[in-house]
Image (cartoon, rainbow, N blue to C red):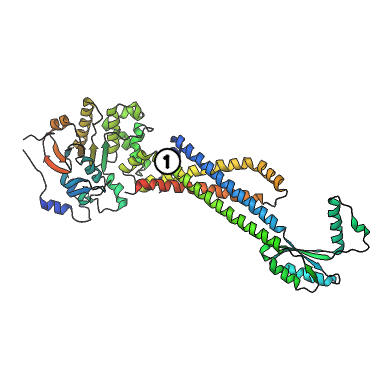
Amino acid sequence: MLTFVVFSFRRAWQGFWRNALMSLAATLTMVLMLLLLAGFFILQNVLLASLSYVEQKVEVVAYIENTATQGQVGELVAKIDAMPETASVEFVSRDEALRRFRETQAAQGREDLTKYLEANPLYASINVKLTAPGDLDTVVAALRDEPIVRNVLNIEALVDRVVTVTTFVRTAGVAMVAIVGLIVLFIIVNTIRLAVVARAEEIEIMRLVGASDAFIRWPFVFEGALVGLFGALITLGLLYAAADPLSSAMVGFFNVLPLQFGSLARDTAVIVTATGLGLGVLGSWLSVRTYLIR
Amino acid sequence: MTVSPGPTPSLIDRLTGRGRPVRGDQNVVVLHDVTMRYPNGKEALKDVDLVVPEGDFVFLVGPSGAGKSTLMKLLIRDLLATHGDVLVDGHDLARIPRRMVPRVRRKIGIVFQDFKLLPRKTVWENVAFALEVTGSPRRNIRPSVDRVLALVGLTAQADQVPTQLSGGEQQRTAIARALVHDPRLIIADEPTGNLDPVISWEIIQLLLRINELGVTILMGTHDAEVVTALRKRVVALEDGRVIRDETGAAYHRED
């Protein structure tokens, strides 16, 4: 058994280097395809991140009666916060609301008109961020039932549009990655097949001198894995080199994007390596099989 | 003069005993009533009976397309007969499990007209290849390869690659590779087809010497001069049928 594994690895290593041109072609195709796949995967993730960023902007604002006591407001905040549909609840007092209003006015360079007012005309509010924008109705209904809630700002039309767009973009993104994945599969398997066909004579000789199927197949499978591994490593190297300028460009474009770069890099590395290895092995397995079944 | 050393029916019956290998038998090859029809409908062999006892030297002759190559492919189980029994060293090739096929092939050494050597490997590596890919322990490989290279007279050329060798040396490398498994049978498909007459004789001499060591030889050839000069057993195929099976015969019918 050990002899067999050592033999297969040695033959795979030899096969890879002695057929350098074919190996190079297969590895480069692998790199190109993995880059394509990784590119689409990253794009898909950036899209998803932008979508959740947009979704986080969906905020239910409930205005509170001026008669409400601090205790009542505290109870309401705790109650809404406990709902599974809500991500965060913030209480904005009347004074705070006025301060924020003044800030925005000042930021837009307008004159502060509130100084002509004798009293604060604004209501206190609780601002609720949702876990998912689809839960809008539940949260709005719960807020409307509260006696101290004066009214709830109606944002249904906006939320509907956001949900429609995000659902579409998510589905389209998954479909794109799936299609690209399929194309990558066919091209890589085909390239490896070419590399195997180029050595049909070697396989023929192995068969004629009485090599068992395992001895013919496994060196090629290991060689395919080698192509996949090298391809994945080169791809990851290229992506790593491109990561910094790319992400700074993206941050510049989307302003502040709540993208988890750590986990995305890890996921991409896993996907690229697994795809490379998997397709290398699958490609060789299928290609050699043609010569074994008689 | 038509001598048919054909076996008695009882022998055939015994040899084709279903399934189990026949042990202690002296026949290396037995074909009984073999018909080979290709998927395209062409019948390459028709009702062929052939028994080759151990130690025999058989010339398989006949025009191109007569079925010589098909017969050889049946013996290495590259093809399965449409009908009839093919036994090699007692193994019924239609009935052995797939994983046994490589083991039976190791009992057969095959030599081709085009040598089928790996161009990037040296003579030594080409011969060792046959042992490596069949899982021989590494410590056994060196003595076996050295021994067969000495037998075919290529010890001095061991480190050369095929392109540095003459045609005869390449064919001797192929013969060494065929011998390295200590086969019971050597199948040679036109081994001298690409060689000039002098070199051809060298190869024939080598095969005769191997035959003297007890290895059965089945050689397909068009070389009338060689066949007639050696007076060995001649099996002639024509249009898929055995039309002549004589010992001590010439290439052409002599009556």
Q: Image point 53% across, 52% down: which residue?
A: A178
Of A260 and B179, the residue lying toward us: A260
Left/right of residue B44 with respect to residue B155 in the rendered view: left
Count of marks placed on residues: 1
Of B214 and A223, the residue lying toward us: A223
Residue type, numbered disc 1:
Leu
Q: Image point 54% across, 47% down: which residue?
A: A273
Other-residue count near label 1 (Cα within 10 Å), few / some / many at <14 / 14–19 / ≥20:
some
Does the image show residue B30?
A: yes
Q: Chain of mark 1?
A: A
Residue B160: where, in percent of width, then height?
Answer: 36, 28
Q: Vertical placement of B197 versus A220: above or below?
A: above
Residue B234: where, in percent of width, then height?
Answer: 14, 38
Of A174 and A27, the residue lying toward us: A174
Residue B218: where, in percent of width, then height?
Answer: 20, 39
Mark 1: secondary structure: helix
Does the image show residue A277?
A: no
Residue A24: where, in percent of width, then height?
Answer: 48, 37
Q: Quadrant of residue A252?
A: top right
Left/right of residue A192 with respect to residue B82 in the rendered view: right
Q: Image point 28% across, 38% down: which residue?
A: B178
Q: Vertical placement of A257 versus A91: above or below?
A: above
Q: Which residue is mark 1?
A: A194
Q: Vertical placement of A157 versus B40: above or below?
A: below
Of B233 and A237, the residue lying toward us: A237
> Furthest residue to the front?
A157
Q: Vertical placement of B247 versus A127: above or below?
A: above
Q: Quadrant of residue B230?
A: top left
Left/right of residue B53 with respect to residue A86 in the rendered view: left
